[in-house]
Image: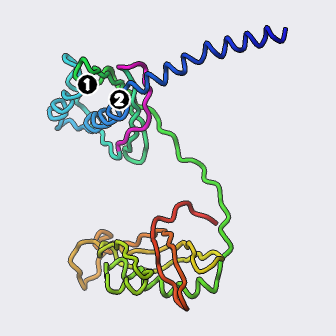
Amino acid sequence: MVNGVRALFERATQSNTPAANETSQVAQGFPSDQASAFAAQFAGVYLNFTAAEAPSRAGKLAAFLPDGADPQFGWDSYGRLGAVGIQPYTIEVTDAKNAVVSVVFQTGNRRLLLSVPVYYSGDDGGRKFVVSGRPALLPAPGAADLPQVAGPEGDEAAQTELKPQLEAFFKAYAQGDTQSLKRYFVAGETLPDLGGALTFGELKSVVVPVGGATREIKAEVVWVVPTGATPSAEPTADPNSVGGRLEQAYRLTVVKQGDKWYVQDIRGAGRAVG
């Protein structure tokens, strides 16, 4: 009886294997990256419309639609819609010539998906794409829950040493003051700077873990964002004419040589802790 059960299991397993391999082969034969790019470009036209721009939209859509399709592809030329942040999200390959691409986008304060059926003509048809059916709007997944992560044990003495040096470093880093930056980099290191795009506001916090002469630290910096407007001595209530403040977080690799710390590398901070 055991041998009979084993035989049934082996036959079931073997019968499932070709289906999985077949799906993999289909996905490999279909140009998923190109289809996703095609669908995203189509979505950029399809999801942005106003009544005044209906003729222009129809002309742009024609590059994506099959012959004889409704020029507005289901829209009655009334109302308006705007979409930004359009990106390919997922693709479901049906066979070597058909797939459904999901494109994620933002409209107002909502994230949504647009499902776009796509047909691929293959080698014999010139390797072309066309939207093969009506798209569909779907809800996009919400933001994930982010668990709290405990921060590392801090070195307060090193933090006290580093803070004034980092303040001077970030000021020069924002200004693009290459001569001043040389005083803060490890000997032989040259790193790109912000070239005056922002102005240093303050060093809000520094986290320095316990360690040796080389540490990876985290710094939260407040930048002052320029307005581009001509400075005026007159007070104003217009928020667009006042330099804003933007908090950002960085990871820096610092090396202690003698009684001074030097920056070896700077990059984005990654996940928040604490």
Quote the CA–CA distance across marks 1 and 2.
9 Å
Numbered range of the magenta stretch: 86-97
**Residue 193 sits in quarter:** bottom left
Residue visible at 33% across and 46% down in the picture: 84
Q: Is residue 258 left or right of residue 240?
A: right
Q: Is residue 91 magenta?
A: yes
Q: Secondary structure at mark 2?
A: loop
The majority secondary structure of the magenta stretch comes to: strand
Crowd band around label 1 with a 10 angstrom C-alpha radius: few (<14), some (14–19), many (20+): few
Secondary structure state at the residue bearing disc 1: loop
Outermost residue toward the bottom in this view = 259
Q: Position of residue 157 (x, y in %)?
A: 63, 86
**Residue 28 magenta-highlighted:** no
Relative to 265, say whether 108 is above or below. above
Tell me residue 32's x, y (percent).
38, 31
Q: Residue at x 45, y 71 (%)?
A: 266
Q: Earlier in the sequence, mark 1 or mark 2?
A: 2
Q: Nearer the viewer, residue 168 or 232?
A: 168
- What is the three-letter code of the residue carrying label 1? Arg
Left or right of residue 92: residue 41: left
Nearest the viewer among 182 and 152 is: 182
Side of 271 where 185 appears, left or right: left
* Circle 1/circle 2 CB separation < 8 Å: yes
Observer-nearest of 181 and 219? 181
Q: With respect to residue 8, does 21 lie above or below? A: below
Q: Quadrant of the C terminus?
A: bottom right
Q: Quadrant of the N terminus?
A: top right
In percent of the image, x 35 and y 29: which residue is there? 31
Amino acid beneath label 2: Pro
Q: Which residue is mark 2?
A: 31
Task: Find residue 127 and name its label.
Answer: 1
